[in-house]
Image (spheres, rainbow, N blue to C red):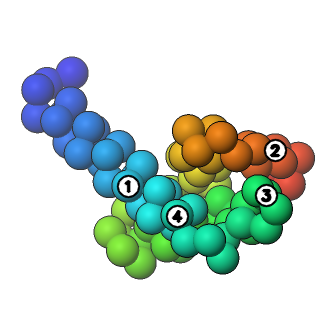
Amino acid sequence: MSPLVKARARIRHRRLITLANDLIRDGSTTVNGITKVTPADYSAYVFGCSQIRLDEAEAADYLNAVLVARGLPRLNTETTN
C-alpha cells in the first residue's frame, strides 16, 4: 500500500471516529446509557457532514468503538445486521 493510500485511510478513519464522537457526545442520543443512534443514522450523518458513504456494518463498527471507549454498552448486533 502506497504512503498516499495509507495517509488517506488514516484521515478517513480519524474523521469517522470524530463524527461518531460528535454524534454520541450529545446527551440526547443515549437513554440510561443505551444509545438511540442506529448505524443507518450514523451513515446518514457522516454523508451529510463529509460526503463519505458507509455501509451499516462499517457504521456499526465505528459507533461501537466510540461507545466502548466511553464505557457504554455496544449496539445490539441483532438489530444492526
Residue type at mark 4 is Arg
Q: Residues within 10 Å of mark 4 (few under 14, many from 20)?
A: some
Side of 18 relative to 81 (left or right): left
Residue located beneath label 4 in the image: 25
Q: Earlier in the sequence, mark 1 or mark 3?
A: 1
The 10 Å Cα crowd at callout 2, few under 14, some 14 to 19, many 20 or more, is few
| Tag 3: amino acid | Ile
The residue where tag 2 is placed is 77
Nearest to the observer: residue 10 or residue 26: 26
Q: CA distance from mark 1 to mark 4?
A: 10 Å
Position of residue 49 measured from the top left corner of the image (x, y, whole percent): 36, 74
Q: Earlier in the sequence, mark 2 or mark 3?
A: 3
CA gap, disc 3 to disc 4? 13 Å
From this viewpoint, is residue 23 visible? yes
**Counting other residues with Cα less than 10 Å from the Cα at mark 1, is it few (<14), some (14-19), or many (20 or more)?**
some
In this view, 71 is above or below 45: above
* Residue position marked by numbered label 1 in the rendering: 18
Measure the C-alpha gap from mark 1 to mark 2. 22 Å
- For marks 1 and 4 on the same chain, the one whose residue lies earlier in the sequence: 1
Distance CA(mark 2)–CA(mark 3): 13 Å
The three-letter code of the residue at mark 2 reads Thr
Q: Residue placed farthest to the right in the image? A: 78
Rendered residue at 86%/54% (across/down):
79
Q: Quadrant of residue 26?
A: bottom right
